[in-house]
Image (cartoon, grey):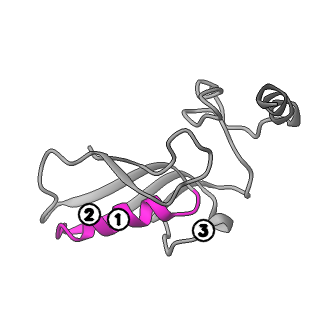
Amino acid sequence: TMAVTSYGASTVSSGVVRVVKDLDVPAEGKHVLIVEDIVDSGLTLNYLASNLRNRKPASVKICTLLDKPDRRQAPVVPDYNGFVIPDKFVVGYGLDYRERYRNLPFVGVPKDRVWNRDSEELA
């Protein structure tokens, strides 16, 4: 297992990738499957895939539950997609907004009142 992040507390990738946990075993000669919840800009995933390819695995494949190709800023094409979705911010099933909605048993687009309420809280 390897963990990387480029989001921190933000909803937009910073573009600066930080390795939170590196692999416990060498990837050389092994078939590597990167499993993602969502592929958005592709910046983090591009860094990760490149990092892993430099370790000389037999192969590197990318699997994602949700793919937003309209947001892509890096040349990343998942090998396996659950769903290709439009450019909407989604929450649920592990995806959150400001540490909320992560535990929803579905993936959905928050209603306008969620954004409006949070704007009032920040004012």
Lower position in the chain sequence, tag 3 or tag 1: 1
Relative placement, left or right, of 25 versus 3 is left
x and y percentages locating residue 92 in the rendered image: 63, 33
Name the residue located 63 percent from the left edge and 32 percent from the top edge. 98
x and y percentages locating residue 87 in the rendered image: 73, 57
Distance in Å between CA atoms under marks 2 and 1: 5 Å
Query: Quarter of the image containing the N terminus?
Result: top left
Q: Amino acid at mark 3?
A: Arg
x and y percentages locating residue 24 in the rendered image: 15, 44
Q: Which mark is residue 72?
A: 3
Residue 108 picture quarter = top right
- What secondary structure is found at the residue carrying circle 3? loop
Q: Which residues are magenta?
A: 40-61
Distance in Å between CA atoms under marks 3 and 2: 20 Å
- Neighbour class for label 3 at 10 Å: few (<14), some, many (≥20)? some
Distance in Å between CA atoms under marks 3 and 1: 15 Å
Q: Which mark is residue 49?
A: 1
